[in-house]
């Protein structure tokens, strides 16, 4: 019995030490011997006096981060948080981590209200979707612009004083594109939005390419698509350099200028989620938490307790009345993901495959857009599961409809 008790105490001690070391690693100082970052790929646009004034005068501020797994992970985000707390030691910060792995800028635009603005007006906002728009969504220039512009427009409409920093991270294919003297489609599309709204950008992708060419960094040191602490520290150093310089300027807080026209009139600037309970079920659909233990494929815990509008048999039908210029679905699509056939306002049914190349072994979160150029006003959609499939099943698991 004594040996058992001793073993239990030893095990508990090891667990506590492990937790301590893990937590300490998240707040540890940035790695040493970082290469010096240049100004070449830090593009300052507009003023950052609004956030400075808020932090210094109100002694409080809301700082939000929106993006994919690079934002969700303990990478550049906590480093920037630590920098802000050090720079404004008397300020009480509210930090919002709105990073969700695998999500693209389109999903970002639809969830900006729920995940960011619901927490209150944002004083300083960071956004990154270049990697996910490239390798996850495979967006066209149009899709990348519509998503990112949707995010920026909503943030600024909610608080015209919001200061924004857009960050372009990098993956191997984007790095190769830059090394071949070309611009990655995703980040260059986002850059168009940044110029249009006078938003500063941190082109980490191009800076990494520069440092590698100068033999001051290797891709292994950087840490890959999901950067190591070393790579994230380079990003944080670029952001610190931008903000430190911007906050040295003098003047009074002013609202940021609003473009007369949108960059794309069909951008998701009014993107929002539509409750699945609004659907009129005709046959085959249910709203409940899926019985995940009986469904093959890996699952992410953040999605396993969410009630979903689900069906797994061909022919299941529903209708949805909605208002706006766009309609899509936010789904988790796994190995059994099916094809939805959609008719809007009596038009012929069109197929939309939910299956993704990452769905083979994972129930993968993604947005599937049915139409994004509808006339403003009320519409009706009819949705059914197709007899055809490109996967092992016909399943559809809808977390939300998406409207604009």
Image (tube, rainbow, N blue to C red):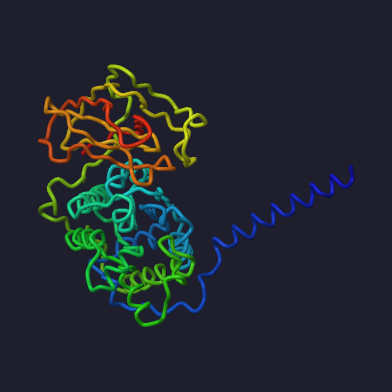
Give the quarter of the image for residue 280: top left
Q: Residue at the spot x=34%, y=31% of the render?
A: 396
Residue 6 lies left or right of residue 209; in this view the side is right
Q: Position of residue 144 (x, y in %)?
A: 23, 53
Q: Quadrant of residue 113?
A: top left
Whether residue 346 is situated above or below residue 195 in the rendered picture: above
Nearest the eye: 48 or 71: 71
Q: Residue furthest top?
A: 282
Residue in the picture at 46% in, 64% down: 79
Viewport quadrant of the N terminus = top right
Q: Give the image location of residue 224, x and y in percent.
A: 43, 64
User: What residue occupies the far bottom of the structure in this picture?
Assistant: 214
The residue depicted at 34 percent of the width and 80 percent of the height is: 213
x and y percent of residue 19 in the render? 64, 54
389 with respect to 84 (left or right): left
Above or below for 170 versus 141: below
Q: Nearer the viewer, residue 166 or 402?
A: 402
| Figure label count | 0
Where residue 92 appears, x then y in whole percent? Answer: 46, 56
Q: Quadrant of the C terminus?
A: top left
In this rendering, position of residue 236 left or right of residue 264: right
Q: Compared with residue 10, is residue 372 higher up or lower down, i.e. above or below?
A: above
């Amino acid at each position: 019995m004594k040996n058992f008790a001793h073993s239990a105490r030893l095990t508990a001690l090891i667990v506590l030490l492990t937790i301590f070391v893990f937590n300490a690693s998240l707040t540890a100082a940035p790695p040493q011997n970082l290469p010096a970052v240049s100004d070449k790929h830090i593009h300052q646009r507009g003023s950052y006096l609004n956030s400075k004034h808020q932090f210094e005068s109100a002694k409080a501020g809301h700082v939000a981060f929106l993006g994919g797994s690079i934002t969700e992970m303990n990478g550049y985000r906590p480093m920037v948080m630590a920098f802000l707390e050090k720079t404004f030691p008397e300020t009480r910060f509210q930090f919002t981590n709105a990073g969700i792995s695998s999500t693209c800028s389109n999903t970002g635009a639809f969830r900006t209200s729920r995940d960011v603005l619901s927490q209150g007006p944002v004083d300083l906002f960071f956004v990154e979707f270049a990697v996910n728009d490239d390798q996850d969504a495979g967006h066209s220039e149009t899709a990348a612009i519509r998503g990112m512009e949707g995010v920026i427009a909503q943030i600024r409409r909610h608080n015209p004083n919001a200061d924004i920093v857009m960050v372009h991270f990098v993956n191997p294919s984007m790095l190769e594109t830059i090394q071949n003297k070309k611009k990655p489609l995703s980040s260059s599309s986002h850059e168009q939005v940044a110029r249009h709204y006078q938003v500063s950008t941190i082109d980490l992708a191009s800076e990494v390419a520069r440092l590698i060419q100068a033999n001051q960094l290797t891709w292994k040191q950087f840490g890959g698509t999901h950067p190591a602490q070393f790579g994230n520290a380079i990003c944080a150093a670029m952001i610190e350099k931008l903000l430190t310089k911007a906050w040295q300027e003098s003047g009074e807080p002013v609202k940021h200028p609003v473009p007369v026209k949108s960059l794309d009139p069909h951008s998701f600037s009014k993107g929002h989620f539509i409750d699945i309970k609004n659907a009129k079920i005709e046959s085959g659909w249910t709203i409940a938490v899926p019985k995940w233990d009986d469904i093959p494929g890996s699952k992410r815990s953040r999605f396993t307790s969410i009630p979903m509008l689900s069906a797994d048999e061909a022919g299941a039908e529903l209708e949805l009345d909605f208002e706006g210029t766009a309609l899509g679905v936010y789904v988790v699509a796994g190995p059994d993901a099916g094809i939805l056939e959609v008719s809007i306002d009596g038009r012929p049914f069109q197929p939309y495959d939910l299956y993704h190349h990452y769905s083979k072994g994972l129930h993968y979160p993604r947005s599937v857009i049915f139409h994004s150029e509808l006339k403003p006003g009320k519409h009706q959609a009819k949705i059914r599961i197709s007899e055809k499939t490109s996967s092992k099943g016909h399943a559809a698991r809808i977390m939300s409809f998406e409207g604009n």
